[in-house]
Every structure is written in C-alpha cells, then in structure tokens.
Amino acid sequence: MMLALLVAVPLVFGLAGWALSRRSTDWSRWLTLAANAVNLVIVAVLWAGAEGAFTMGTQPPSSPWLAQVRWPWIPGLGISFSLGLDGLSLALLALTAFLGIASVLASWKSIKEKAGFFHFNLALVLAGVNGVFLATDLFLFAFFWELMLIPMYFLIDLWGHENRHRAAVKFFLFTQVGGLLMLVSIIGLAVVHSMASGSLTFEYNELIGTAMSPVVGMMLMLGFFVAFAVKLPAFPLHTWLPDAHTEAPTAGSVILAGLLLKTGGYGLIRFALPLFPAASHSIAPVAIAMAVAGIIYGGLMAFSQSDMKRLVAYSSVSHLGFVLLGIYVFTSQALSGAVLQMVSHGISTGALFILVGALQDRIHTRDMNRMGGLWKQVPRMGAAGLVLAMALVGLPGLVNFVAEFLVLVGTWKVSMAATVLAGVGLVIATVYALRMIQMAFHGGPREKWDIPDLSVMETCVLFVMIGLLVGLGLFPQPLLQIVDKVVAGVLAVIPSGGGA
Amino acid sequence: MSATDLLGLFPLIILAGASILVLMAAAFIRRLVVSFVVTLVGLVAALAFVGIAWHHLPLKVGALLSFDGFVLFGFVLILAATVFVAISSWAYLRGRDDEGGDYYFLLILSSLGACILAASAAFASFFLGLELLSVSLYALIGWRRERAAGTEAAIKYLILAGATSAFVLFGMALIYEATGSMDLFRLARISSADGLIAPVGLAMILVGIGFKLAVVPFHLWTPDVYDGAPAPVTAYIATVSKGAMVVVLARALGPAFVGNGGVSHVSTAAPPLVAAGFPWVFALIAGLSMFAGNLLALREKNVKRILAYSSIAHLGYILVAFLAGGPQALRAIAFYLVAYFTMTLGAFAVISALSSPEKDADDLEDYTGLAGRSPWTAAMLTTMLLSLAGLPLTAGFVGKFLILSAGAGAELWTLAVIIAINGTISIFYYLKIVSVMFRGAEAAHAGSTGHPLPAEPAPAGVPMSGAVGAPLLAAIAIAVLALAVVALGVYPAPFLSIIGSFTAAGG
C-alpha cells in the first residue's frame, strides 16, 4: 500500500496543483513540494523498517523483497499491478524524493510561464520514476518507463533554453527507440516463458530463471540493454544527453541527470543481469569497453566546452561510465560502487545544475568566456561551486570518492587495463573541474556583472545537498548495507560471477 | 432460414428504413435538426437490434449474409462510429447553413453498405456492400462543392474506387471459373490444387481490399481525399470504411492463418494459398505501409494529411496482428480497431469543431497556441494524438502492446521490430502537432488578437444562431471519446473480456 502511494501521491498532488493553479500558481508549487515531502516521509518510514529488518534479522531470507504490492490489472494477459521494494529501490526512491524537493525549490522563482502545467509535468515525471524503481511486473515497468518521457519532453520543449525544440525531439526519439525495443523484448521474454511453462505472465519473480537458447537470450537481452544504455547513457548512444541537459530548464536538468539517467543503471541491475545472466556475461567485455570509452571521451569533451551546462552534461557521460563499468565487471565491490555512484552523481550533478541554473538566471549566459572573477561578487556561489567541483574530481571525504574508489577496486581484479584507463578519466576530471572554477570564479572579471549572491533558499538547498555528499562520504555504510543483499543476489546468478 | 435468422437482418432493415425516412422528412421539413434526429434515432434503434440479435447467434440469411460475434462487433463499431460522425457533422453543417437531408441520407446509406460488407458471406453481398459504401462516399467526399479540392478528391476517389471495383469483379469471376463457388469463405481455402487462375483472382480481390484499407501500394488516394473531404466525412472514411473491410478480411481470410503462426502448415490437404504462398505479400504490405505512412507523414504540414498518412501506418499495424492468426490475434485486431476508431474519431471531431465555415482547420499553424486559447480542446486533441502515438495511459499503448504480443506469439520478430521502429518515427509528427499547440500559448496569452480559429467550440463561440445544441453535443462527444481513450488505456481488463465474448460467440 505504501508503495502504491509513492506513485499515487505525486500524481494526485500534481493534478490538484495544476487544477488549482488557475487561482494561484503558488498552489502548484506547494502541492508538488508537499508530494515530495510526503514521499520522503514514506521512504524514511520504509527505510527505518528495512534497517530494523537488517539488524533484527527479521527479513525472511527466502524473499528478496522488503515489501510487495500485487493487484490484478489485466488478468487475461497475465499482467498485474505489482510493485516490490528492495534495498536498491529504496536508495533510489530516497534520491527521487530528495531531488524532487530540490528541483521544486530551485525553480521556485525562475518558472513564471504556465507554472501550473510545469509542476504537473514535474510531478508526473517523478511518479513515473518512482514507478520504474518499484515495478516488478514487466508490462508495468514498460508503462512507467514510457510515462516518464512525455512530461520530460514537455519540460524541455516548453520551458527550455534557445534550442529546446530540437533537443526535446532528440531526447524523445533516442529514448523512445530504446523503450520500444525493450517492449518487444519484454513481450518476447513473456512468450518464451509461456511456451516453456504454459502460462502467460509478466511477473518479474516468475520470469527470472526462464531457460532459453543463447541466441534468443542474447537477442532479448540486447533489447533491454539498448534501452538502458541509451538512458544511462553509455558511450556511443549518449549524443542526446548534452543537448537535452543543456537546453532543459534547471529543474528538468536536475531530474534528467539526477533521476532519469539512474533508471538506466537501475534497469541493468534489476532486469538485464538477473533475467539474462548468460547473455549479460558474454556481453560484459563490450560493456566494459563502452564504459571506459565513455569515461575518457566524456572527460575530454567536458574539458573542451565553454558552455558551463554542457560541461556538466559531458561530465555526466564520464561519471556514468563508472556505473556501467561497475555493473559489468561482476564483483561485489564494483557493483556496490556503481550503486553508490548513481546516488552520488545524482546529488552532486543535481547540485551543479542548480548552481549553473542560478548563475544563468542572473547573468543570462552559460558561456564561461564571459564570466571570470565572479568569486568576489558571489562568494557563496563560488564556494558551493568549488565544493561541487571537488565532487566531480572525486576528492576523498565526498561520497563520489567512495563510489569511484569501490568501482576501481572491484575492476582491478577483473581487468587491469580498464582500471588504469578509468583512472586516467579521473585525472581528466581534475582538469576540467578546475578549469570550470578557474574560468568562472577566479581571475579578473571579463565583463562587468552586478548580481546578487545565492538567495537564502538556494543556499539552503545547496547546503543540504553538499552536506549529504560529505555525510555519505564519511559514513557510506548505511547505504552500502542496504544495497548489500541486492548486490549479492544479482551476482549469485551470473555464471562464474564474483570475480569472473 | 428460420424466423430468428431474420433478427440478423433487422439492423440492416432499420438502417435502410431510416435512410428513406431522412429523405422523406427532408422533403417536407427542410431543417437540419430533423434530419439529424431521425438519423440518430435510426442508428440507436439499429444498435438495439444488434443487442437482440446477439442472443441468437449464429445467424445465417440465405447464402448471402452470416452473422457471428465478430460481425456484430463490427456492427456496433460501425454504428457507434456513425453516431459520432453524425454528431460532429451536425455542428459542422450548421455552420455552413446546410439543411443536410441528403447528407444524412448518404451517411446512413454508407453505414448500411459497411454493415452488409461486414456480414457478407458471398461474393454478391460483398460486392453490394462495397459499392453501396463507395458510391455514397463519392458524394459525401465532394460535399463542399465550392471548394475545388473537394471535387478533385471526390473524382479521384471515384475513378480509383471504380477501377478497383472492376478488379474485384473480375477477380470474383476468375475464382468462380476456377472453383465454381461464390462463397466468400472459400477464399481462405484456395490452394494450388485449384489451378492457376484462382490465385490471380485472389490477388485481384486483394487489390480491392487493399484499396479500401489504404495500405501500400494502394494508398495513393488517401492524403488528397482526407484533405479534400469535409472533416467529419474524413473521420468516416478513416474509421467506418476501413473497419468494415478489416472485419471482412479477418472473417474471410483470417481462418487461413489460424494455427499457422506464419511458419508452416501441418495439414494433409494442399495448404491454403493465402497462408502458405501469400504471407510474405501481407508482411510486405504491412511493413511498407508502416514505413511509408510514417515517413511521408513527417514532411506534412497539414493536420488532415498527417492523419491520412498515419492511418496508413495504423492499418499496417493491424495487418501484423492479422498475419499472426488465431484467437489472440483476433482479440488484438478487435481491440486495436476500437482504439483506432476512438482516437481517430476524437481527433477528427476536434478538427471539425475547430473548423470555420470558410475553411477546415487543417494547417498546422491553425493550432499554434491552442492550449492557451482553449485548454480543454487542446487537452482532448493531445490525448488523441498521444494515443495514436501509442504512449501509455491511452488505448493506443494497450493496442500496440496486444499487436506486439500477437506478433511475438506467432514469432513475427522482424515485423515486431518494425512496429517498434515505426512507433518511434510516428511519435515525431504527433508530438509536432502537440508541441505547436502548447508552444505559442505565451504569445496568445500576451494578447495577440485575430486568432485564425474560434476561441472555444463552446456555445459562446458560435454566432450563427441562437441554438447551442450542436456544438454542445459535439463537445460532449469529444469528451466521451477522450474518456474512452484514457479508460481503455488505464484499465482495459473489463473491455478485453467483452471483446473476448464477442470474438468467441458463434464464431
């Protein structure tokens, strides 16, 4: 029941906010904020229960799920409304609620046009993302997967920057091709399963362990892999990301980078690996190569940008390469690191987009060549930027360091070459992150700007986000503990897993 | 033939009677309301008799007509769609000071033709239904005589439909010569044992079917006719005329694919030609229709033409389910037909409502900022377009899912992937319309005057006369269709079981 609420609350509050926005647009803001706050409370309650289960050992060892919901939906087709919560979903749901609040607050002042519709779309994306993180019926998963796209398209197309129409269409086409191929794969998987067992079902728990020939397994797995790799995004499929991130409004960028990209990593861990262990194992070398290429390519591209938002976008390509790498080396350290990286990247990049958005609202440009010497003008912004740049670099003390370190440690046992090359990516990160700070905040002013520093609200949002980065960086154990069981479960089904 | 068998005929008799009644009424009282009400009453009465016939399936009227659950499903679809077309025509004609007696006469007559077509069991009734439908449509397409494009579309349709009718007739003659049978269901059993002439005849009949379905390569008339015809008539061509033909196709040729799965036939007799020799033809037609429809729609800037091309692609999707064969496929076809009818009627109802007496609202620019001017209308059209694009929460998503399932069940993987690719291409142009509607909203809000379209298709926006019934009813119809699209998309389970009982009964 609680799980269904996580999807229903943003939906209902978003609709109500839109309806009431005719009276005052503040309604939509407050209600979207409230929806996320309610979700945060629900997640906290679930988390407390999960902690209890871990420490007391009351979680039934047979079931991987902490909580489940299953209602009949289209029984004739073996489709049910079934949601399941485990440690991985819990961590990402917490991230969703948190970034949801951050994105509403970050766009509190900057969205004036059609604010009601804006917040409705925002709430709808969040409902879709929550659904994706919870669905254990594959039809339902595809349903939520598509549901995320339309409102995101509107967010970019209607409230974005100069080239928003093109970026929105590009975003939509890329993710939609992946999504529909995944739908074909899902149906194919269900058909293969029904041929073997005689009953048509889309339930994840029953489809797991479906026996199939290597060729069929590979074809079906590729459908999933393409969808998730586009969303992640993995190296050759990433080209939609810089445009979409750059053109989206601040809240859109935060949600895109913080949450939508995570659905790709989540899908790989939740579906691609457990459903097709053999095929995943054989595609691993390719995935690792894509990951390493993405890490280096993203870093180099980030270095060559003068548009600040584009720089952050390319840094995402680089950092999500670590997620892909961590998933496909099949060691428990690396996989834990990949999950941690998803969370840390969500927070740090979300914060960076809020900062860049705040800067753009003030000086109406993202061109770093026109900035410079801003530290004197806006010291709070500069300080926040410096800390977040350190997060890009992966400085010890921040959770990004823990995540990337774990991935590298886990990779070392599998492929030394990949480890070294990914390590080079970290060096490149240092270069582009410092260049960004240097060009924007240090040196002499290139143009005369007279702008206010971060408002109290913006300062609070960024302070909390940075606080989380530091807090999790010093004490990552609660997060690692909660995903531990999921990691072990996934690796258990990979052939010769755990150090292959 | 017993007395109960006549029950199947009652819907047809009522339609025929209603058409004459409309004409008679128009002779004495030349008022649009009267024609409209008589039409509506006739359609509803026919629907009621479908309900009665439902309890006495299967029915057979001579060798000409036979009724099973799927036929009655087709009747309901045709009649309900005609009701919606009649409603949006009312508002549309009223804006043009047209008393509409003959218009409604032709509308009922073409529905009669569509019903006969759907129920046909022999070549004679098949041809009768086909011609009744086509001939009524010639006049309806060219209804706006003042527009050259309308006349052009009517003549184009007339020539092409006439030519394909000749093909169909010749094909029938050839099959009769080869097999000695005028039975429509014999088509599915034509095999290599029937000689060389039979397949030629079959191919010629398929030309006629393909023309009505507007699938590649028989699609060339579609954009011009959609564009030239009045918006409600376009809706009618897109739905009823194609739907009736899909019912015939599934009934007459569908059995050839049962248990086929597109792979091989394990049967002692010579395999039916349609399934053993022709599946690649259907597969090719389906694939080409999807690609051609969606790719050609990308370049269009005229909303009616975009929908014309998109309908070509949608029929391609349906053909994939048809190829799959079996009860699952029949369910997929039935559901997709309902979804396609609902969203297409909805989209065209909005276009009709937005059209001014001078000009149909078909330019993409007409829709700029619609969301700002009349948010509800824009929301309705958005719902329809997102459903046509097959996005979740709408009927289109479930329909596409069912078709993919049917295709996957028959291992038509290539076609399934083609559907996936085409689903993506199609989203591009549907979203183009949607984003245009929302895009200019700021400008419209800022106080730009002289909108190309009336602000709302609501009572206040129509200055023509005092009565508010027509636009209000049209608005209600649009809302009902939008609700249906969402309901089918969110909770299709009850509806699927209804369809299941239709496709199972008396089959």
Image: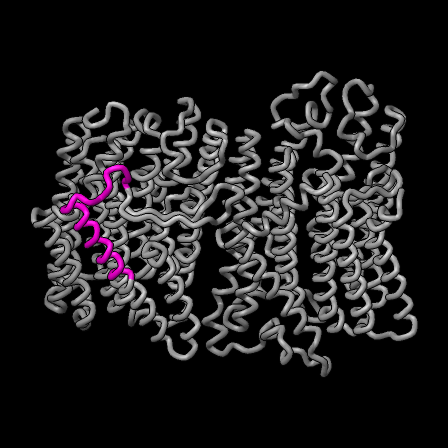
Residue A50 falls within the magenta-colored stretch: yes
Front-most of B465 and A38?
A38
* Magenta stretch bounds: A39-64
- Residue at image position (81%, 63%) is B42
Front-most of B364 and A259?
A259
Q: Position of residue B15 (x, y in %)?
A: 84, 57
Q: Position of residue B285 (x, y in %)?
A: 66, 35
Looking at the image, the residue that sits furthest to the top is: B268
**Location of residue B37 (image quadrant):** bottom right
Front-most of B68 and B307?
B68
- Residue at image position (61%, 57%) is B303
Image quadrant where one finds the C terminus of chain A: top left
Residue A70 falls within the magenta-colored stretch: no
**Location of residue A457 (image quadrant):** bottom left
- Above or below: residue A313 compared with residue A291: below
- Residue at image position (77%, 19%) is B192
**Location of residue A282 (image quadrant):** top left
